[in-house]
Amino acid sequence: MMHVRTDRVCIVMMSAVGDTVHVLPVLHSLKRLNPAMKVTWILQPGPATLVRGHHLVDEIILFDRTRGIGGFLAVREQLRSRKFDLVIDLQVYFKANIITSFINASVKLGFDFARARDLNWLFTTHRIPPHAMQHVQDQYLEFCDWLGAPITPVTWELGPWNQEERSWQRSFYSAIDRPAVPIVVATSKLQKNWFPERWAEVCDALYADFGLQPILVGGRSPVEVECERIIMERAKQAPLSALGNGGLRGLVGILDGAALVISLDTGPLHITVALDRPVVSLMGFSNPKRVGPYRKFGDLMIDAYGEPGEDYPVSMENRPDRMKLITVRDVLDKVQIWSSCYTS
């Protein structure tokens, strides 16, 4: 633990939605340490929509990487006249290093040498101690431990925040007469995806055997739209589709109103955990001990990453071609566990 002023703090974590969710408990921890803290967060436009309006985030500086060098120059200009007490550099990629170099701060705190990829350690003044690999959420909370900030309870506060969002959520669910099961049907990484033909079978079973209403959720990328098309063609009882409906904040509202969520390894999985909604997670490519649902709903997780009985270590190793091992029966067995254990 080191004593550092924390009146003005800048967070560097700019991209992935899941990582953005993992930053929120860090903010809660820091605010418990210093309630008067003012937090500036540098974010890309997409993830920024997830946290804009959060009561712990005082300011967001947008980094638009689609503008190329112009995006970097725009951020540098906004930071030129600023002075911070502390930078928490949670992103160890070169683009984040460049942004960190623009920030005028007494302390720039980053990962230890072993975890500071892309020469990240050259752009920080202080580093958290080395630690064995652990869940990403716990890795982020190591920064709080270094600062002496209380890390429990782990809190997110991600749900709909205002009357407009609540009204949108009520309107969305007003026409649905069954408990809803949003299904996150695809991700940006093909190795994390499952087969749309199997999703169609799951949708039919949810509707006919469990009395549930499946809802396809996510964005409208070409992969997701194609998955939607196949599911709609194959399913005997077509599910509802809400792909792209309401944007990222709308997705939060849909997940918040769900009875159960079924998700691949992607940002909405972590949103669902943060909302404390039960989630069946399909894990095969990424190590679930590092990026799986954090300390909740482990009994609903399908682990195709490891062999049966394998006590694999926490690591960043990915294992390709394992999502195909997950069967429709595997998913429905987890839905049955939810039905038996979470609905009484």
Image (cartoon, rainbow, N blue to C red):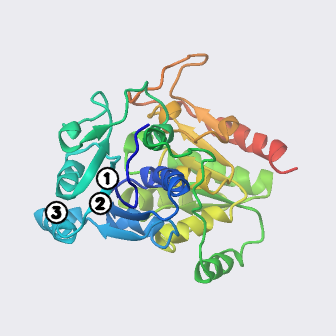
| Closer to the camera in the image, 86 or 26 | 86
Number of other residues with Cα within 10 Å of mark 2, as a class: few under 14, some 14 to 19, many 20 or more: many
Q: Name the residue rendered at 56%, 16% in the picture.
A: 310
Marks 1/2 in contact by CB < 8 Å: the verdict is yes
Query: Residues at badges 1 and 3 in contact (C-beta under 8 Å)?
Result: no
What whole-number distance in Å separates the C-alpha atoms at marks 3 and 2? 19 Å
For residue 84, the mark is 2
Give the image location of residue 58, x and y in percent. 43, 70
Q: x%, y% of residue 162? A: 60, 78
Q: Residues within 10 Å of mark 1 (few under 14, many from 20)?
A: many
Position of the N terminus, as image quadrant, is top left
Kind of residue at badge 2: Phe
Measured in 3D between alpha carbons, the distance from the residue under mark 1 to the one under mark 3, in whole angstroms, is 17 Å
- The residue pinned by badge 3 equals 72
Q: Is residue 120 left or right of residue 263?
A: left
Q: CA distance from mark 1 to mark 2?
A: 7 Å
288 vs 21: above or below: above
At 11% from the left edge and 63% from the top edge, which residue is drawn?
Answer: 69
- Amino acid type at mark 1: Val
Residue 87: numbered disc? 1
Q: Quadrant of residue 234?
A: bottom right
Q: In the rendered structure, which amino acid carries the disc numbered 3?
A: Phe
Q: Give the residue displayed 22% in from the left and 37% down from the top.
A: 121
